[in-house]
Structure formats: C-alpha cells, structure tokens
Image (cartoon, rainbow, N blue to C red):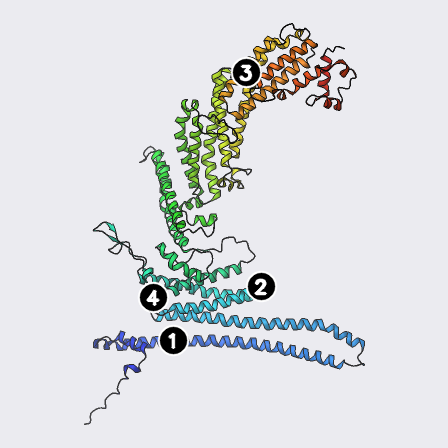
Amino acid sequence: MEAAAPPPPLPLLPDSNPGVRCFLDGRFRSAADLATAADVEAEIRGRCAELEALVSDLSVCIYEAAAAYSSCREAAGLALRGVRDGLGALKASISTGVGEEVEVGTEKMQFEQLPALASEVARVEMVREYAETALKLDSLVGDVEDAVSFSVTRKLKSVGDNSEKTHHVVIGYLRNIEDILASVTMTRPQWACLLSAVDHRVDRSLAILRPQAIVDHRALLSSLGWPPSLAGSKFSSIDSGKQAEIVNPLFSMTGDLKSKYSESFLSLCHLQELQKRRKARQLKGHNVGNQLRQPLWILRDFVDSMDEILQPLVDKAKLIGYSCREEWISGMVIALSSYLAKEIFPKQIELLQESSSSDAGCTPYQARVSWLSLVDLMISFDKRTQDLISGTGLLLTVKDDDNWQRISVLSVFCDRPDWLEVWAEIEKQETLDKLKSAMESEKNWSTRNEGTMLEYGSDDYKSPVISAAVQQSLSLLIDRARPIPSIALRAEFIRMSASPIISEFLGYLLRRCQEAEGLTALADDNALLKVSQSINAARYFESTLTEWCEDVFYLEMENLSVNGEGGCIFQLEINHLKEFRVEWVSKITTVILRAFDSRSRDYLKNKRQWQEKSEGPAVSRAFIESLDYMQGQLSKLEGGLNALDFVTVWRSVASGVDQLLFSSILTGGTKISNGGVERLQGDLSVLFAVFSAWCLRPEGFFPRLSEGLRLLKLDDQQVRDGVFTDKNWLREHGIRHLTAADTEKVIKNGVYEA
C-alpha cells in the first residue's frame, strides 16, 4: 500500500503579509493553541463579512455620488446647450440684419432683446457656478464622511493605528469646505439652503471626529504616565516625609513619541480653530461679544510645560487669543469653584442658619468667623493665581469680567448673589462691632487726627481720631471687594456693606450735635466745640470719599444702576455729609448773630446818637462790647473748626451783621447828621478791624454799610437834583450792591448841610 501524498509545504514567512504574520503569532503562541483554530477561522470570517459589508456600503455611497454628479452634469449640459443655442440665434439674427436692407423695426427689436439675453446668460452662468460649487462640496463632504467612517471602523478592528494622520487629512478637507462656504456666504448669500445642507452634514461628522480626537489624546497622555499618581513612591516619599521630585513626562518625550504627541495636540488645536471659524461665519451679523471664545479642550497639570511645549503648538495652529497657562489655571479654578459651590458654601449657609438656635453647636460669632476665614482663603488663592499668571510677564488675553471670572474662585458669588449679600452683611456687622466702642470713647473725639492736610492750604481738617479710624476700617472693607471678578457685584457689595457704615457714622455725628443743641442751645463753649468736632469729621469724610471717587476702581462703577442716578458710588453719602455740614454751620452762624443782635439792641435803639455831635472819640461803647463778644466767639471757632468751614462761618456772620446794621440804622427811618456820620464811620472802622484778621479788605464783605456810608458823605449839591435813582448815577458813585429804593431811603435819612 502506497503511502499518502505529503501535504503541500507552507509558504515561507517572508512571503506572508507582516500584518497576517503578526495576527497568527498572537493567536498561535504554542502547539496547544492549534485547538482554537476553528474559533480563529470564525473570527476571520466574521471580520471578512464586516469588511465586505463596509465595501458594499462604500459602493452604494460611490454610486449615489456618481448619480448625483451625473444628474448635475446633465443639468449643466442642458443649460450650456441652451446658452449655445441662444448665442447662435443671436448671431444669426445679427448676421441677417447686416446690410442696407435692414429695416429700422427689426434693428430696434434686436436691441430690445439684448437685455433679456444678457439676463439669461447671467442666470445660466449662476446655475453653472451653483452646480460646480455643489459638486465640489458634495465631493469634499463625502471624503470627510468616508474618512471618519473608515477611522471609526479601523478603531473597532485594531489597536495602535496612527489616527493622527487620519485626523489631519479630515481637517484638511474640512478647511477646504469652510473656505468655500465662507466665500459663498460673502458672494452668494441667497444660497442659504446649500449652506445649511452642508453645515448639517459637516456637523454630523464633527460630532464623531471631535470626541474621538479627544479620546485619542487622553489615551496618549495616559500612556505617557500623565497625570502622575497622587499616591505611591513616584509622587512622594513616605519614609522620608519629603516630597519627591516629579518628572514631567512632556519634557522627557523624544523622537517619534514627541512627534506623535505634537501631531495629536495639533489636531485638537486645528479642530478648535476650525470650529471657531465656523461659528464666526454662522453668527456673522449678530452681536455675540465674547461668546465665541471657549476654553481649550485639553488641560492637564504642570504649568511649565504649557509655556514651553503646548503654547508653540497652539500658536502654530493659529488659534488666536489663547494662552495655555491661562487655560490651565482656568480649568483648576473652575473645578475648585464648582466644589465650593456644591459642597462648602451650602454647609456654611446651614451653619449660619443653625447658629441662631438655642441648641446650635456654635455661636453666631463663630459661624461668621468660619465664613470670613473661608473668604480669606479664597482671596489668598486668587492672589497666588494672579501671581502665577503674571509670573512670566504675561497679561490676561481678554481683560473683561467674563475672562476674569474664569481665573477667580470668587466667581461663585457671580452665580449666587444671595451668598454675596450674606458676605456683605457679615463684613458690615463685623466692622460696626469693632467701631462701636471706638465711637463711644470721648477721647477719640477730643484727640485730633494728624496728617489730614488740605490740598491747597496749610491747615488741616482738625478732624477727631475717630474719623480716621472709621475711614481705615472702611478702606479695609472695600479692599475685600476688589478681588470680586465683576464690576456690578463689586458695586453691589460696597453698597450693601460700606454705605450702611457711612450712614451709621453720620447718624452718630448727628446725635452728638443734637445732644449739644438740646442742652445749651449751642450757647456754651463746650457745645460749640462738640458741634465743631462733628463738622470736622464730616468734612474729612466727605473729602476722603470725593478723592476715592476719582480712582479708576470707583470710576468703573459710575455708569451702573446700582447707585441710582449714576455718578460716584458714594455720591448719596457725600450729599448727606455735605447737607449735615451746611446745616450745622448755618446753626452756628445763627447762634452768633442772635447773640450779637441781643447785645447790640440798646445800641440800635439809641437813635439820638446819630443826630448829636460827639466831643470825644467817635466810637460807641455799646457797639464795641458787642463786637468784643463776636470776635471772641469767632476766635474760639477758628481754633476748633476746620479752615474751610470757618471761612463759611465768618463770611456768613459778616453778611448777617451787614444786613442787620444797614436795615436798623441806614434804612430804619433814623435821621443822621454829619456828627452821626462820623460816629458811624468810627464804629464801622472798628468792625472792619475785627474782620481784618481773616481778610485783607474787610469792607468788601460789608457792601451795604460801605456804600450807605459813601452816600451819607455826599454833599447837598450832589443829591439836590434827585437823580440818585438813575443807574448811571449809581454806577458813577460806586453804588453796585444797593437798589434804587435803598439808595433813596439812605439819602432821605441823611441831614445834609449846604
């Protein structure tokens, strides 16, 4: 019996496909694996069936694309044939009309047909352009869909393929599509249906491509060992208790690995740049502001690598307006802010609410301290974040509230204004509690604050120490609002916390003045001093707030509705302080004038003295005593009241004395002889001497008395003609503050001698 024929020899390994050889090596590692040959065969047949189905689907797509192309080509061919026939007819009609036999009517008809033919040519040209554009877009979109489908299928079938190159190819197609769509948007906006159809198909492909690119990049990062483990010997040394040196894997990349990582990151950047272009085109004409800006899609730890490795790749992708360092910080801040908003602040609110009950585990004070400690940590964190950004000399790429909120954990208050209100209330209460004992100490009112110099004078505000204490506390409170990443919320915080403190301080000033007025009607020196101290404090605070309002920090808030009518955020408080000052300066002036009137009553009632000729000095003793009292009161006020408000006081007193003496003596029906004129001149010289301590020309602050005395010195010839009511006559004799009626009364009261 003959032996069976030997089986055909297996092909040599070099003749086999490397992929097949790799596949077989993975399945048949030992002789025992030959038992699974049937399973391997079934797996291979399944894969072949799937590939055949994919080929079938691709064939259908190609057939549909070819059919669409054929249909469009036939439509374009028909249109072009129509154009050719029209041009031929036009040529024939023109050629037959050449010659002397052409009739005028025929020539006119030919010219009338030219606009219609030109319009038809333009329409056909637009149809041709539309067909070509549609075919080109359909081809590019088909390439994108095929590449995306092939990439997904290959991802399911095998591991370790070079997907970065596939992504770059697809992105190239997408860029060409976007260039065409941008051109169509500019030149043919009426093709909106074509744009919408293409955008719809591209969106479907991007919905697959973008997540796949992100997943691939994350897988690459994981294979590099990024991020490092938070536990284990690689991160820390438990035995030594010291932090071990952390090696950034991005710095250790070399060769093909570094090239692969760069390609992957560039793919993401190109995709985001493309997405930004598409959104800008689709939203063109709409006021979108900063809404087109989105965070970079991939963020990890180690900020050093952001500047040295990732930023050049972002710049290479022409992704304008992005800083990897800012994006890294923003991702970290957003994560922390979300944790604070979900986990920490709700517990803090619950703690504040429970602290008011009798069985609470902590007091309200402890709950407030816990809240303020948390805010302190947040402010400190934001300062370190700002230092991290500015550490390399870089500035924020976009300086607005939205961008600032991305890098500040205090942005939690932007989403929860009710938490901001709680914070402002706690800060206000803490500040008032600290100031309460200081405002009740009389020593803080009697001791002057040094160093509050006027801008244009040598005297200070003479304000009490308490005013500087309140100003410093207010300044510290406002500094707490500076890190809030929203102008509107900063203004709201100041309105809820700082403004009530100013109002409380003003109320305390008012109560002190009312107490002094109620006890002695301001006739006592101590009462005047007490009121002067309150006026000085109000003047100092008003000046401080006015100076603050000129700072950029407050100027940003001027146009907000938080302060009602616009202007400085402290404008309402400044107005209230000014009204307080004016009111009590007026009351001091009134007290001095009433006392002067009371002491001058006998002097003003003695009408005979103005008709007698004095043998001694032409000065009235009673008037001198009244002036001595007034001078003493003004001198005391000069030492206790700030310079600006003291000027207001003595000028108001001078105006009041001028009006009182003028109405009582010169226009009161009293006849004044030449001897009375001498006496009046002597009294007025003493009056002017009293006020010469505060001005160079005191007579200028007594215009009625000065001009009345000038009228009484006129001789009989100058007033005989009765023209003293004429404006020119008054101007000629230097009368500018008296009316014609007052002038007539003064002259009629004078006893003139010929």
Residue kind at label 2, given as amino acid type: Met
Q: Residue 217, position in %: x, y?
A: 37, 63
The residue under label 4 is: 257
The residue under label 2 is: 186
Residues 751 and 681: in front is: 681
Residue kind at label 4, given as amino acid type: Leu
Q: Nearer the viewer, mark 1 or mark 4?
A: 4
- Residue at mark 3 to residue at mark 1: CA–CA distance: 113 Å
Label 2 or label 3, whichever comes before in sequence order: 2
The residue under label 3 is: 631
Label 3 or label 1, whichever comes before in sequence order: 1
Q: CB under 8 Å between callouts 2 and 4?
A: no
Q: Secondary structure at mark 3?
A: helix
Q: CB under 8 Å between callouts 3 and 1?
A: no
- Residue at mark 1 to residue at mark 2: CA–CA distance: 43 Å
Residues 509 and 40: in front is: 509
Q: Local crowd at mark 2 within 10 Å, few (<14), some, or many (≥20)?
A: few
Q: Nearer the viewer, mark 1 or mark 2?
A: 2
Quarter occupied by residue 127: bottom right
The residue under label 1 is: 51
Residue at (74, 11) in percent of width and height: 752
- Residue at mark 1 to residue at mark 4: CA–CA distance: 31 Å
